[in-house]
């Protein structure tokens, strides 16, 4: 089964990693993010480098605290795991304790004084007059109009068309010249 490079990297997010850079330095810190160019974001980063003393010719390791670090992907040579992700203390505290406990119904937010008395709590009394919906007068029955109704159906033909259909003859609709 083949895994993509992205999914291989995802499994190491939040791990403590050691990154080796092209110039020989090593960075140790929490692996927080990466992108398609393999740029890395490292938290709580510490840099380690080997330094030669000019007089004594001995090599010693220097440590420097960097904090939050962005490493360009071009510079990365290797990555190795230093340690597992840190345990989140907040999640550990929120874990439910096992064993018997007291169960109580949730009150759905209605204060006890209103629940016992049968009154409605403020804001739960129903719609407020004048807020939303049409104006009160627009929903009242309107008095009937006194003018004659307008006929939009198939009553009389338009003026000048006569009473018959095409070819039926009628006033002003004869065939040919008079």
Image (spheres, helix red, strand yellow):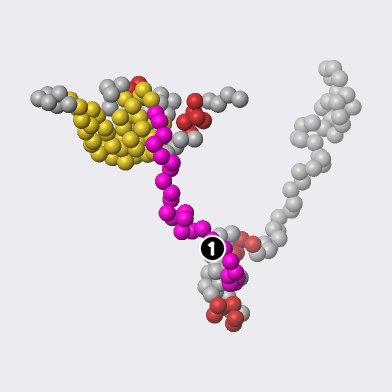
Q: Position of residue 137 (x, y in %)?
A: 60, 64
Q: Nearer the viewer, residue 96 or 81?
A: 81
Which residue is farthest top? 176
User: Label 1 belongs to which residue?
Assistant: 97
Q: Quadrant of the C terminus?
A: top right
Q: Secondary structure at mark 1?
A: loop
Q: Is residue 126 visible?
A: no
Q: Is residue 30 above or below residue 166?
A: below
How many dots with numbers?
Answer: 1
Q: Nearer the viewer, residue 150 or 97?
A: 97
Which residue is farthest bottom? 117
Q: Is residue 112 above or below residue 30?
A: below
Q: Is residue 165 above or below residue 143?
A: above
Q: Position of residue 4 (x, y in %)?
A: 53, 25
Which residue is farthest left? 55
x 57%, y 63%: residue? 98
Residue 47 lies left or right of residue 175; in this view the side is: left
x 36%, y 22%: residue? 77
Find the magenta span and give its range.
Answer: 79-104
Local crowd at mark 1 within 10 Å, few (<14), some, or many (≥20)? Answer: few
Q: Position of residue 39 (x, y in %)?
A: 37, 28
x 61%, y 61%: residue? 138
Residue 150 lies left or right of residue 126; in this view the side is: right
């Amino acid at each position: 089964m083949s895994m993509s490079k992205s999914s291989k990297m995802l499994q190491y997010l939040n791990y403590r990693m050691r990154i080796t850079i092209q110039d020989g330095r090593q960075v140790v810190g929490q692996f927080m993010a990466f992108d398609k160019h393999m740029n890395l974001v490292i938290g709580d980063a510490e840099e380690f480098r080997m330094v030669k003393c000019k007089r004594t010719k001995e090599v010693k390791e220097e440590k420097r605290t960097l904090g939050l670090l962005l490493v360009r992907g071009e510079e990365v040579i290797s990555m190795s795991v230093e340690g597992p992700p840190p345990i989140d203390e907040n999640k550990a505290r929120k874990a439910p304790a096992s064993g018997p406990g007291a169960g109580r119904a949730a009150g759905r937010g209605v204060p006890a004084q209103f629940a016992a008395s049968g009154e409605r709590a403020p804001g739960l009394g129903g719609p407020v007059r004048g807020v939303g919906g049409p104006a009160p007068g627009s929903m009242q029955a309107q008095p009937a109009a006194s003018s004659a109704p307008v006929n939009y159906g198939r009553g009389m033909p338009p003026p000048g068309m006569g009473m018959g259909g095409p070819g039926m003859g009628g006033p002003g609709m004869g065939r040919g010249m008079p």
